Image (tube, helix red, strand yellow):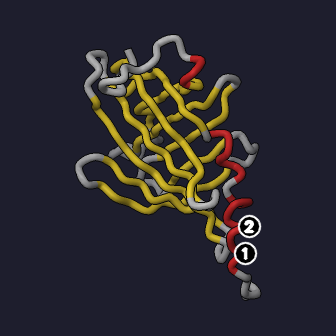
Amino acid sequence: MKAPMSWEQRGTAAQNGLIPLRFLLGEWTGHGESDGVVIRGTCLVRAILNDTFVQVDEKLFDASGTIIHEDHCFYRFEPTDGRIHLTHMMAHAWLTERSVEVLPDGSGIRWFDGPFSPIVKLTKSPSGFRSEVWLPSDNAQPPALSSHMDYFPANEQENQHSETDGAPQ
């Protein structure tokens, strides 16, 4: 059994436990593909509540600039179990809690809750980060890559988003 920790110790442990997610912090624009369709996206990632949570707000757009996917995530490190936890919300009132693991090589993180759940993998890239979603198969086949996005710092991206709708042009 772990020794009780003070409120200050808990805060410090929570901050330190989120260090593997620090590469995600920033404002990002990206491009990729979802189910064979070219998409663009925006992603705002920031540390909140004294750096004890990481909040991610992502929007994906089709070629016309219409939002096709929107989600919000809150990551936190729980000192009592030594794990990163995720609260994930998507449009159409979807809410789920997930476990997050740091990849063994330190290149990023992934969410995975078992053979019948999606796998989301976020990895560092030379100029930003890559997001991949792998969906489970109905016929005992390995998961298939459903979508990927390559994100770059928003201030370095040529195609900035419109002030009126947030959609990348």
Is residue 121 shown above or below 73?
A: above
Q: Is residue 74 visible?
A: yes
Relative to residue 9, is residue 62 depicted above or below?
above
Q: Quadrant of residue 81?
A: bottom right
Residue 97 position by quadrant? bottom left
Q: Mark 1 — residue? A: 8
Q: Residue furthest front?
A: 163
| Front residue (pair 164, 94) | 164
Residue at position x 57%, y 60% in the image: 49
Q: Position of residue 34 (x, y in %)?
A: 37, 27
Q: Residue furthest left?
A: 92
**Residue 147 against residue 75 in the figure, above or below:** above
Q: Residues within 10 Å of mark 1 (few under 14, many from 20)?
A: few
Which image quarter holds the C terminus? top left
Q: Nearer the viewer, residue 108 or 28?
A: 28
Q: Amino acid at mark 1?
A: Glu
Residue 68, given in percent of the width and then of the height, sits at: 28, 32
Category of crowding for the residue at label 2, using alpha-carbon neighbours closer than 10 angstroms: few (below 14), some (14–19), many (at least 20): some
The residue at which mark 2 appears reads as: 12
- Provide residue 65's location: percent of width, then percent of height: 29, 20
Q: Quadrant of the N terminus?
A: bottom right
Label 1 to label 2: alpha-carbon separation: 6 Å
